[in-house]
Image (tube, rainbow, N blue to C red):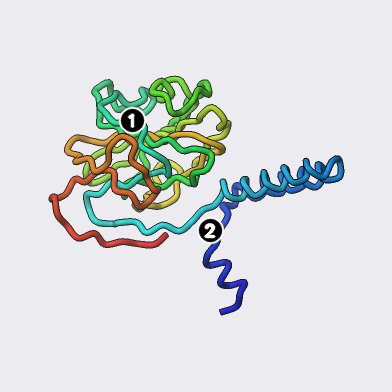
Amino acid sequence: MSMIESIRKQVAPIHPEGRNFIILFGIAAVILHYIWSPLGWIGAIATLWCAYFFRDPARVTPVQDGLVVAPADGYVCSIGQFAPPPELGLGPEPMQRVCIFMSVFDVHVNRAPVTGRVTRIAYKPGVFVNADLDKASEDNERNGMLLDAPQGTFAVVQIAGLIARRILSFVHEGQNLGVGDRFGLIRFGSRVDVYMPPGARLMVGLGSRATAGETVLADYGPAAQERPYKVA
């Protein structure tokens, strides 16, 4: 194995959505270097951070029936019973919700928490308060997706944060998703909420660290089962 191949295996690939940003950051770093050398170093560090932000590593996803995996990297900032966003048409009854906050240092590629069919995508404009706050679920710009799964209907809501200004969705209504499949990305700090149908046995607590496509948030199956995995 060559040194280049070895490095490629160790470094996470960059998501295509980030390539133009990295180029712009790099150009800015060169310009700043010609203006004043120390500014160029700051620009170089910012360019490296931008590449780090848009990394898209492979994940090992448990694919056992009944498991709900994390849709985002970050920490669990809220757990409880909450009414889902009205634009998704699920009614006013509270559902079990788990919220994951992504800092600017987390991977921001989002993955499907369950295998299912996308039955609705609903975008709602809003403000950009800190995504770590509870009111962000109601007030911030968001993009919601319904997934019809064997366990029932799940809602996955991408929420913009204080810095985030763009929510990207890679899927369309009627599309089938496998658990752990990439479905979207949010630029520069944000949050993802998962609303679950009744019967979920939660496997995380407040403050837990979550890894998209790997961490099990909830289980609808028997208490003890072996978990098969896929790498994607």
Extreme-front residue of the structure: 38
x and y percentages locating residue 75 in the rendered image: 39, 39
How many numbered tags mark residues here? 2
Could you tell whether 199 is left or right of 206 in the image?
left
Q: Which x, y percent locates residue 162?
A: 54, 27
Q: Label 2's element? A: loop
**Residue 3 position (above or below residue 40):** below
Q: Position of residue 223 (x, y in %)?
A: 13, 50
Mark 1 residue type: Ser
Q: Residue furthest right?
A: 34
Q: Nearer the viewer, residue 111 or 6?
A: 6
**Residue drawn where x is 46% and y is 38% of the image:** 102
Q: Residue at x 38, y 23 (%)?
A: 134
Q: Which mark is residue 78?
A: 1
Position of 76 with respect to 162 (left or right) is left
| Residue type indicated by callout 2 | Ala
Residue 171 in view: yes
* Left or right placement of residue 154 versus residue 11 in this view: left
Disc 1 secondary structure class = strand
Q: Which residue does the image show at 33% across and 49% down from the upper left?
A: 215
Classed neighbour count for the residue bearing mark 2: other residues with Cα under 10 Å, few (<14), some (14–19), many (≥20): some
Which label's residue is closer to the chain start, 1 or 2?
2
Q: Which residue is mark 2?
A: 12
Would you place residue 109 above or below residue 127 in this image? below
Image point (25%, 24%), residue name: 94
Closest to the observer, 87 or 41: 41
Question: Separation of disc 1 and disc 2 at Cα?
Answer: 29 Å
